Amino acid sequence: MDDNTPRVLYLSETFSSIQGEGSYSGYPCFFIRLAGCNLRCRYCDTSYTWQSGEKAAVDDILLAWKKSRIPLVLVTGGEPLLQPAVYELMERLVRAGATCLLETNGSISVARVPFSVVKVLDWKTPGSGHADSFQRENLRFISKKDQIKFVIGSKSDYEWGLNRVREHYLHHMCQVLFSPVFHKLEPQELASWMMTDLPQARMQLQLHKVLWGDIKGV
């Protein structure tokens, strides 16, 4: 591919909605959901992204974002870092003035992600079936603006995540999120465990699912 060839990504969907997770929860957000994933988590709520998706030029994706008039953008998947052109997309979003978030499953290095992009890394718990997938070198490339999320489906998932937080002093590196699996773990249970152990972590609910349910495109 030469420098004049349009860069393309395999795209699952784009849409505008309320950001449902993390430190930007509650803000209007433009979502760029890329296709393809290298994991098959048991609790995955976007398994439709495992398919190949539709080709879209980076220029066209940027134009769709600009038409939304929303400054906050989330690049997600699937696993967005599987596609090399995602780095150009993030760089151009940042240059255009976007507040850019990246949600990644933690199994791929984030070393090339632009520093100003807010990285949200999902450290997979045993309940996902991929507890060994996290690349621990990624801890070298995160800062206080970034987030590590543990999706919790059981008490054993919670205790496992709590041990990772304490083992690596994660709360000194970044923001730590504990999120219950929707319709599997009652939020009240997770809250009670956290109030007993008082971890340096923030409990979060998936606000978009509270608002609209577990449906596509929100």
Image (spheres, rainbow, N blue to C red):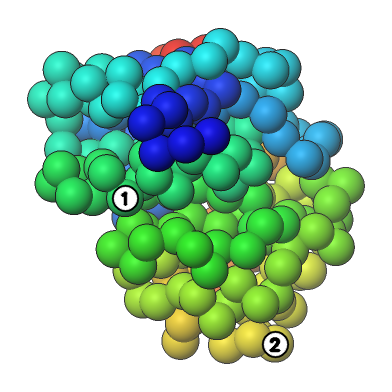
The residue lying toward the viewer, choosing from 63 and 198, is: 63
Secondary structure of the residue carrying tag 1 is helix
Disc 2 marks which amino acid? Glu
| Quadrant that contains the C terminus | top left
Quarter location, residue 174: bottom left
Q: Residue at x 65, y 22 (%)?
A: 49
Q: Secondary structure at mark 2?
A: helix
Give the side of residue 73 with respect to residue 134, left or right.
Answer: left
User: Along the polypeptide, which appears first: circle 2 or circle 1?
Assistant: 1
Q: Residues within 10 Å of mark 1 (few under 14, many from 20)?
A: some
Residue 195 is at least partly visible in this image: no
- The image quadrant of residue 211 is top left
Please give the label number shown on residue 75: none
Q: How many marks?
A: 2
Residue 164: x and y in percent read 70, 77
Q: Which residue is mark 1?
A: 91
Q: Is residue 149 above or below residue 41?
A: below
Mark 2 or 1, closer to the camera: 1
**Label 2, on which residue?**
167
**Viewer-side residue, 109 vs 121:** 109
Amino acid type for the residue under numbered disc 1: Glu
Residue 195 shown left or right of residue 78 in the figure:
left
- C-beta proximity under 8 Å, tags 2 and 1: no
Query: At 72% from the left edge and 23% from the top edge, which residue is drawn?
Result: 50
Please state the horizontal and vertical placement of residue 32, each as a whole percent of the image: 41, 28
Query: Where residue 209 sits in the image (x, y, percent)?
Result: 47, 25
Which picture quadrant has residue 182? Answer: top right
Question: Would you place residue 158 above or below residue 185 in this image?
Answer: below
